[in-house]
Amino acid sequence: MKLLVVEDDSDLRSALVEGLRHSGYAVDEAENGEDALFQYETENYDLMILDLNLPERDGFSVLEKIREADLEFKVLILSARNQAEDKVRGLDVGANDYLTKPFDFIELEARIRNLLRRQFIQEKTDLEVAGIKMSIDKNQVLVNETELKLTKKEFSILRYLLMTPNKVVSQEELISHVWDSHANQFSSSIRVHIASLRKKLKEQLGYDVIGTKVGVGYYLVKETGEEHV
């Protein structure tokens, strides 16, 4: 999942970005409201963490601008403003959640997970395709009932493939949802992660469950006899 952290305090912003990346998210950052809107309009994010006291354009204005065009995008306000009036205004303008500073990072993570679960059809937290079962809540993958140990990037790639089981996913789309905006789409690191994930799954399933359509992208092979494109 790809997040945008909008915070003008550089120390707090760096700590948030580092902590969320350590938790397995792809994270970009913005230090003012104008940059936040520019990045929102040019990148594909799953959720924005938004401060209110921002230079150039404040958080309320950023949120109002987003809601003019998009009612579904997830926005979590993270602000030192702890008055009821500010919370009510933030939620009325269109925030999905409001957390005040100071805060516990584990609570922020829990709220992010809760919002991201709502993003998918009927908010599935358990996914299953071709003998692969994933529990997003437990951060667990079972293949034929045997737990599979994956890196955070491998888990994120597999999660996206499981969430889009009936389509071929391009490398660019995977970058958009699993890597931050600094990722180089021509880098071999993406193919390395795919190869490692493919090997681990094949060892458990007995066949290659990640198919490749040359020049297009990757897809899940749902049956042993299904032909790879």
Image (tube, rainbow, N blue to C red):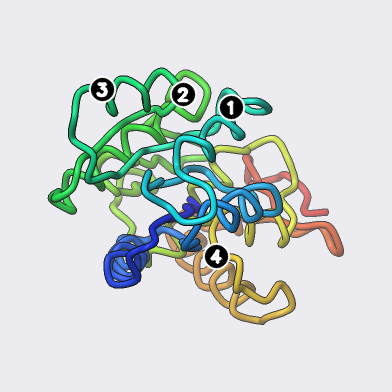
Q: Position of residue 179 (x, y in %)?
A: 55, 64
> At numbered mark 3, what does the secondary structure look like: helix, strand or loop?
helix
For this rendering, which residue is in front, 135 or 27? 27
Contact between marks 3 and 2 (CB within 8 A): the answer is: no
Kindly tell me whether residue 150 is visible in this rendering: no
Mark positioned earlier in the residue sequence (3 or 2):
3
> At numbered mark 1, what does the secondary structure look like: helix, strand or loop?
helix
Contact between marks 2 and 1 (CB within 8 A): the answer is: yes
Q: Position of residue 172 (x, y in %)?
A: 72, 60
Mark positioned earlier in the residue sequence (2 or 1):
1
> Which residue in the protein does label 3 denote?
85
> Which residue in the protein does label 2 denote?
94
Q: Tell me the amino acid under the disc marked 1.
A: Arg
Q: Real-space Cα distance between discs 1 and 3?
A: 20 Å
> Which residue in the protein does label 4 denote?
180
The tag on residue 133 is: none
Please give left or right for residue 158 compared with residue 78 in the image.
Answer: right
Q: Tell me the amino acid under the disc marked 4.
A: Asp
Q: Tell me the amino acid under the disc marked 3.
A: Glu
Q: Real-space Cα distance between discs 4 and 2?
A: 25 Å
For label 3, count other residues whose C-alpha is less than 10 Å away and answer few (under 14), some (14-19) or many (20+): few
Mark positioned earlier in the residue sequence (1 or 4):
1
For label 2, count other residues whose C-alpha is less than 10 Å away and answer few (under 14), some (14-19) or many (20+): many
**Of the residues tagged 4 and 2, which is closer to the observer?**
2
Mark positioned earlier in the residue sequence (1 or 3):
1
Q: Considering only vertical position in the picture, is 42 above or below 135?
A: below
The tag on residue 67 is: 1
